Image (cartoon, rainbow, N blue to C red):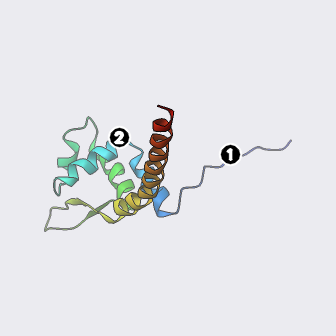
Amino acid sequence: MRRITRSRPRAPTDHLSVTFAALADPTRRAILARLAAGEASVSELRLPFRMSQPAISRHLRVLERAGLVSKHRDSRWRPRRIEAKPLAELNGWLEEYRKFWEGSFAKLDVLLEGLE
């Protein structure tokens, strides 16, 4: 009898896929929104959520692996801060599609004006 094994899907390795995967979760997006206002500790980040500190730490690890968040040490305090580079790369990728859609809408406007 042949044994069927299921493998886990491979984790994305390119920066864009890792960034999208990290941003797919609403909690992680909310954490980034909070960090956009300034640095915060894990306990400060946990306050608006009904989650344990380990659960928030797991979300932070995902964001750190994506390069969206970094931590540094300030004596005993280890604040997290938002990092702009992955978001800038994501914005650059999205910009190409924005240009495409704006061009498509402009062509549609011309076509609709011709029908009037």
For badge 1, the amino acid type reads Arg
Question: Which residue is labeled 1 in the image?
Answer: 6
Residue 94 at x, y = what percent? 43, 55
Residue 50's spot in the image, x, y percent? Answer: 26, 34
User: Along the horizontal axis of the image, is 95 left or right of 75?
Assistant: right
Residue type marked 2: Pro
Gap in Å between the C-alphas at discs 1 and 2? 28 Å
Badge 2 element: helix
Q: Count neighbours of disc 2 (C-alpha within 10 A) and say few if under 14, some if 14 to 19, many if 20 or more.
A: few
Q: In this view, does 97 lie above or below 88?
A: above
The residue positioned 46% from the left and 48% from the top of the image is 101
Res. 42 mark: none
Which residue matches tag 2?
A: 26
Helix or strand or loop: what does disc 1 sit on? loop
Q: Which residue lies furthest to the top in this view?
A: 116
Q: Which of 3 and 17 is in front in this view?
A: 17
